[in-house]
Amino acid sequence: MPSGADAHHGHDTLKYHLLGPSLTKAGQDAVDQHRVSDIIYHASRGSKFFSNEEAKDKTLTDKISHILATKLLLERRDLRPDLRRADDYIAELELSRDLSQVVVHIDCDAFYAAVEELDRPELKEVPMAVGKGVLTTCNYHARKFGCRSGMASFVAMRLCPQLVCVPMNPAKYSAKAEEVRAVLAEYDPRFESASCDEAYLNLTQYCREHHVGAEEAVQQLRDQVHEKTRITVSAGIAANAKLAKICSNKNKPNGQFSLARDRQPIMEFMKTLPTRKVNGVGRVFERELDAIGIKTCGDIYEYRAYLAQLFGQKAFQFLMQCYLGLGRTSIQPAEDYERKSVGTETTFKEMKSPDALRMKLREIADELEDDLKRTGFKARTLCVKVKLHTYEVYTRQSSPPFAVHKADDLYKYSLPILEKLMKKLPDMKLRLMGLRATHLVSAKKPGIDFFGRPTGSSSAATKNKDSEGDWEVWPEAEFEEAVRQERNNEMNELEKLSQEYEKQQPQPEAQWTCPICILPQPPNDTTFNSHIDFCLSRQTIKEAVQSTTPFTNTPLQPSSTRPTPSTAQKKGKRGRPRNEPPTLDEKTREKRRAFFTLPTNPTP
DNA sequence: TGCCCAATA
DNA sequence: GCCATATTGGGCA
């Protein structure tokens, strides 16, 4: 666990990071994570991968220093307006809380491994993983040793020498997944596939029509899945998708957990829930939150006045919804979402010969042509990605004069990007190359729709199942798109307003005081930044924190001079009939980039 | 606005 | 000796 301001001592944070992204997955609770991280650390030390992780860890540690420094600054300012905004937003969210839906998250237990075990029952008795190079999943025997999905297999072998690795069989998994989905459809024909082995269902109607409770229905569903497919699944039952997802992890494997659909139990549940358990909080954000003192969703409340300035508006909203246990209540088939990009990438043995690299690009272009053909798109822009032998990643993009989909064109218009990169990075040695098509245009119905936008961006709704039913989907897709557009405009408007508000702020102070060295400093931003950097380099944040008078949030200026902009209140719905929280973001990712973008004191 | 990067699942 | 694909958000010019 990273722990507060001293987390960056030694290699603790790096070791923690190396544990991988799926730390919250089930089966790890009884594992000695310190032993595991030590083994991983020593197994990978010295590799280029390791050096890169080390560098990333350093960057993050610096970023966290900046966040802490910013927080120190904020503590010396009048936060009442921010507090007010946060409380207003909470009130608004609370009004929109929807407890009327029965949302269920279904998660297959160690899916790929389970499918392999069906064919080879002897694998059930031993630690086993699926995947070469990197484990895509592993059974619960393997997890007892600390093995996890996403882990390099040589590391996994170090943790568990008896581990049996079997190669992937994607076709087999999707066939099995289809069997599972057939059962799910009986309970909610409009269920939503979140991935190959995960789905959301809305059982409100089913429960009503069959006069059964949610838990009973889910038990029955799970039994039926097992009976028909021999696959065990875990389930979470709650009032929204976010909670359901968390709940499905509670009694894994082969179990279910139901969270009462009432405000109080939900608040209690969130209070002690580690932030990392929430979909959207990963290793980085967890550490950033931890640094300022937030370990659980309940802790968020105490810091509500800081969050927008430290992490940005989106992250603020996301976190407030975490604190309140709010989430999406509308479940819809994945086909209803529009695709934004199609891409392919491959890792290969390091190479640097320009000719070989061009050939590689050609292969990838061929590959992408297939994918575009299959999905029925053309690309208005192409994005080349390269990963150096050092694991540094670069991406460069360009827009061909017309929408492309043929391999020849893909190659023709992406080659200059590659050449430019080769010029910029002479002798670059690559381990990965990728090509991605964005700004998609439907290859089927080109033209301009009646909103004046190129079709494809919206006709994407019809991408799957293209044989029938397209036309019925259209109006609704258009409507959704229009609604989204409107919401965007609204947001931009408010964004602008709040920026203008920042500009109008009275600038009473000619100087600001560095919270670290406590000396008055000249007023402009550049000296502000470099001074803080300088101070930070002389003194660790921990010392800085200790040397500063804690939390007297003394107003530096009368709050009356700071009118409260109501950006938070207005955002969201404005009379639109929607039964989900204003920013439908389960998907909203928290954000960083917190450096010094706060309305810092003065720029005269 | 378009480009690039990083985080996340 | 450390994957592949897609989405999202933020900084910046």
Image: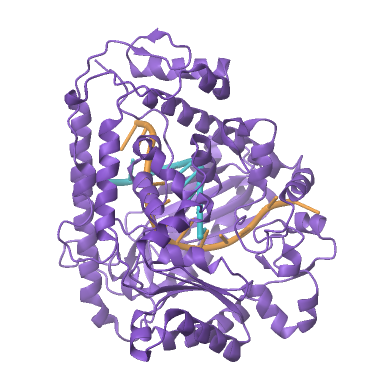
Chain colours: A purple, B cyan, C orange
Residue at the spot 50% in from the left edge and 39% down from the top edge: A288
Up the image or down, A130 lies above or below B6; here it is below
Q: Is residue A441 visible?
A: yes
Instruction: Tell me residue A534's x, y (percent).
Output: 51, 15
Question: In the rendered image, which quarter is residue A582 located in?
Answer: bottom left
Give whichever of A549, A284 is nearer the camera.
Answer: A549
Up the image or down, A153 lies above or below A37; here it is below
* Quarter that holds the C terminus of chain A: top left
Instruction: Tell me residue A93's x, y (percent).
Output: 28, 54
Instruction: Tell me residue A431's x, y (percent).
Output: 64, 49
* Quarter that holds the N terminus of chain A: top right
Question: In the rendered image, which quarter is residue A144 located in?
Answer: bottom right
Drawn side of residue A241 relative to residue A77, left or right: right
Give whichever of A176, A261 is nearer the camera.
Answer: A261
Drawn side of residue A63 relative to residue A354, left or right: left
Drawn side of residue A165 relative to residue A360, left or right: right
Give whichever of A306, A395 is nearer the camera.
Answer: A306
